[in-house]
């Protein structure tokens, strides 16, 4: 089920008659004097990525780059204390839903970041939309074995109890879903088609919502 999107006033724009709203799902909308609106598209700063920093989504607000997570947190939870950082509870920088944001100290943010970097590849749960930090985390949170989580994410189970995939495979699975549905069958040796075949239409729609944001492909050195 698609979550209801609720909007809150954020601030007035630089030009007369313009203002911004922020949704609980982590989007920023600009209103113009003539009644039209424009969604502020999230983006990643390439220089920041080249320096090896953790990914941070920004939006352009009256010509200025602003941290999306901080905007959403302040609108829905209040001021951010001096020296504090905003982190994503599930470790997914693309999930800027207000309920996924948490204010921590700089020291806490550093410890959490170091812990997450030591984990394995993130795994996406197509049933709930959650992203787990690793196969171990996925196993603990879904009450299955780590090997089972890996088998699901690697497309080794034709009818998994919980549809899972590695986060880096989401786009390939989405493409495979279309092929499988158009063809009416799936290639049992293609892990993306195996995973896609197990998805319901509702799960596919949820998956598509998770790849709508503009992302940076570090290997290809390009946006996708």
Image: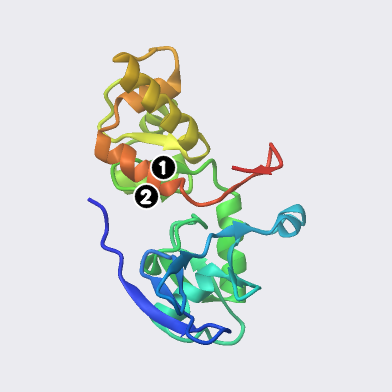
Closer to the camera, 33 or 85? 33
Q: Residue furthest front?
A: 34
Closer to the camera, 160 or 212? 212
Does 137 appear above or below 193?
below
Q: Which mark is residue 197?
A: none
**Looking at the image, do the residues carrying marks 1 and 2 touch, with CB atoms under 8 Å apart?**
yes
Q: Which residue is label 2 attached to?
A: 130
* Spot occupied by residue 3 in the image (x, y as percentages of width and height): 27, 58
Badge 1 density bin: few <14, some 14–19, many ≥20, Cα 10 Å: many
Closer to the camera, 188 or 65? 65
* Spot occupied by residue 17 in the image (x, y as percentages of width and height): 47, 85
| Of the image marks 1 and 2, the number of the one nearer the N terminus | 1
| Disc 1, SS | strand
| Disc 2, SS | loop
Q: Is residue 122 left or right of residue 152?
A: right
Name the residue located 36 percent from the left edge and 78 percent from the top edge: 8
Q: Residue furthest left?
A: 1
Q: How many marks?
A: 2
Name the residue located 32 percent from the left edge and 34 percent from the top edge: 163
* Spot occupied by residue 117 in the image (x, y as percentages of width and height): 60, 51
* Spot occupied by residue 79 in the image (x, y as percentages of width and height): 48, 86
Name the residue located 72 percent from the left edge and 55 percent from the top edge: 46
Q: Quadrant of residue 42?
A: bottom right
Q: Is residue 105 left or right of residue 11?
A: right
Work out how far the residue at label 1 is from the one at label 2, CA to CA, in angstroms.
Answer: 6 Å
Q: Is residue 156 visible?
A: no
Q: Is residue 112 visible?
A: yes
Does 97 appear above or below 75?
above
Does 125 appear above or below 20?
above
Q: Which residue is label 1 attached to?
A: 124
């Amino acid at each position: 089920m698609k979550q209801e999107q609720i909007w809150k006033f954020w601030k007035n724009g630089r030009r007369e008659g313009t203002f911004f709203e922020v949704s609980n799902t982590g989007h920023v909308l600009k209103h113009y004097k003539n009644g039209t609106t424009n969604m502020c598209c999230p983006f990643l700063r390439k220089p920041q990525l080249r320096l090896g920093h953790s990914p941070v989504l920004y939006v352009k607000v009256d010509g200025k780059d602003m941290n999306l997570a901080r905007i959403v947190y302040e609108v829905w939870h209040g001021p951010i204390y001096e020296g504090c950082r905003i982190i994503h509870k599930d470790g997914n920088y693309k999930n800027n839903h207000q309920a996924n944001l948490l204010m921590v100290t700089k020291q806490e943010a550093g410890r959490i970041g170091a812990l997450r970097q030591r984990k394995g590849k993130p795994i996406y749960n197509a049933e709930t939309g959650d992203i787990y930090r690793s196969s171990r985390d996925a196993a603990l949170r879904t009450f299955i074995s780590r090997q089972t989580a890996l088998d699901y994410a690697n497309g080794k189970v034709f009818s998994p109890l919980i549809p899972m995939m590695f986060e880096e495979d989401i786009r390939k699975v989405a493409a495979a879903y279309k092929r499988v549905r158009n063809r009416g069958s799936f290639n049992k040796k293609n892990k993306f088609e195996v995973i896609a075949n197990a998805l319901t239409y509702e799960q596919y729609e949820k998956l598509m919502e998770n790849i709508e944001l503009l992302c940076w492909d570090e290997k290809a050195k390009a946006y996708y």
